Image (cartoon, grey):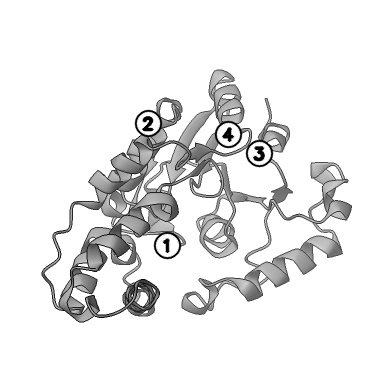
Amino acid sequence: MANIGFDLDGVLMRNPFSGHVFPAFHRLMRAAPALRDLDEAAAAAAVTRAVRERWGALMRRGEFAAAYDWDATFHAVAERFGGGVDLPAVEALVREGCALPGVIAALPHARETVAALAAAGHRLVVVTNGYAAYQEPVLDALGLLRYFERVVTPDWAGAAKPQREAFAAAGPLDWFVGDTLVHDVFGARSAGVKAVWLDAALPDALAALPVAARAGRPELAACVAESLAASQYAVFHPEADAASCTPEAVIKDLAELVGVVGP
C-alpha cells in the first residue's frame, strides 16, 4: 500500500475565500477611516493591493508559513487604513461560507477517488498551505476529512510548501498530488517524493495518451515551461526550474490517479 499526499485547493475542493471570506472582508473594511470616502471599486482595489503587498513582503522575507495567516494579514491591513474595523476570526467567515449554497465544493471525482484509495488500504494525508482553521472545516463540511490520517498545515508544521519540512511533517510519502508546480511538484520532489501534477488544462494531445506515456513527452516539457513562466510563486523560489518542476506523472482528471498509484 502507498502513502499518498494531497494538496487541497484546486485538487480536492473549492474553498470559501473567493466566494465569501474575501468579499466579507471587503465589506467590513468600508468602516476603515481611510476608505470611507472612496467608492466601492476604489476601496476594494486599495484593500486588495494592501493584502497582496503584505503577502508578497512576507514571501520575499522567506516567512512562508506566516504569509498564509489571513487573520494576521486582515488585521494588519485594517490598521494600515486607520483601524476601527470589527473583524471576526477568519475561521468564523470560513464556517459561514461553508453553510452558504454554492460557495464550497468538492472538485470533480474528489470523493470517489479518495474513497477508493482509502478503501484499498492506502494511507492518505493532506499537505496544504492553508491554516487548519481555514481548511479543516471545509473538508469536514464536504465529507472528506474522515479519509485523511493527517492534515498538515503551516501553523501546525511551522513550514509551508515547497519547504521540505512541510512534507516531512506528513510522515512517509510515496506520492504527492497537486496542481501547483512550485508548491506541489517542486516541493514534493525536493523532499524525495514522487509528484503527480493535476493539470486540468492539459492539451488534448497529451490527455489522449495513456497516463504512463505522458511523462517525458516534449509536449509535457512545454506545458511545464508555460505554467512555470506564469506562476506567481516562481519569483519567490528561483531554485524551482523546469527540470525540478517536472512531475513523475501528469493527470488531467483526478479519476486518473488510481491508475498511477495502483488500486
Mark with earlier residue (4, 1): 4
Q: Residues within 10 Å of mark 1 (few under 14, many from 20)?
A: some
> Does the CB distance between marks 3 and 2 fall below 8 Å?
no
The residue depicted at 57 percent of the width and 72 percent of the height is 240
- Disc nearer the start of the sequence (4/2): 4
Can you tell which mark lies on residue 163?
1
Residue 161's spot in the image, x, y percent? 44, 59
Categorize mark 2 by other alpha carbons within 10 Å: few (<14), some (14-19), many (20+).
Answer: few
Callout 3 touching callout 4 (CB < 8 Å): yes
Q: Where the N terminus falls, by quadrant? A: top right
Check disc 1 and report its element: helix, strand or loop.
Answer: loop
Q: Nearer the viewer, residue 163 or 131?
A: 131
Apparent side of residue 251 relative to residue 103 in the rendered image (left or right) = right
The span from disc 3 to disc 1 (Cα, nearest Å) is 25 Å
Is 181 located above or below residue 61 in the figure?
A: above
Where, quadrant-wise, is the C terminus in this rendering? top right
Viewer-side label of 4, 1? 4
Distance between the alpha carbons at the discs numbered 4 and 2: 14 Å
Q: Amino acid at mark 3?
A: Leu
Task: Quickly name the residue at label 3.
Answer: 254
Residue depth check, mark 3 versus mark 1: number of the one nearer the observer = 3
Q: Amino acid at mark 4?
A: Ala
Q: Which mark is residue 140?
A: 2
Sequence-wise, which precedes: disc 3 or disc 2?
2
Residue at position x 67%, y 67% in the image: 227
Residue type at tag 1: Gln
Q: CA distance from mark 3 to mark 2?
A: 20 Å
Which is in the foreground here, disc 3 or disc 2?
2
**Residue 199 image label:** none
Report if the CB atoms under discs 4 and 1 are less than 8 Å apart.
Answer: no
Look at the image and tell me whether residue 149 can be seen: no
In this figure, which residue is indicated by the disc labeled 4? 110
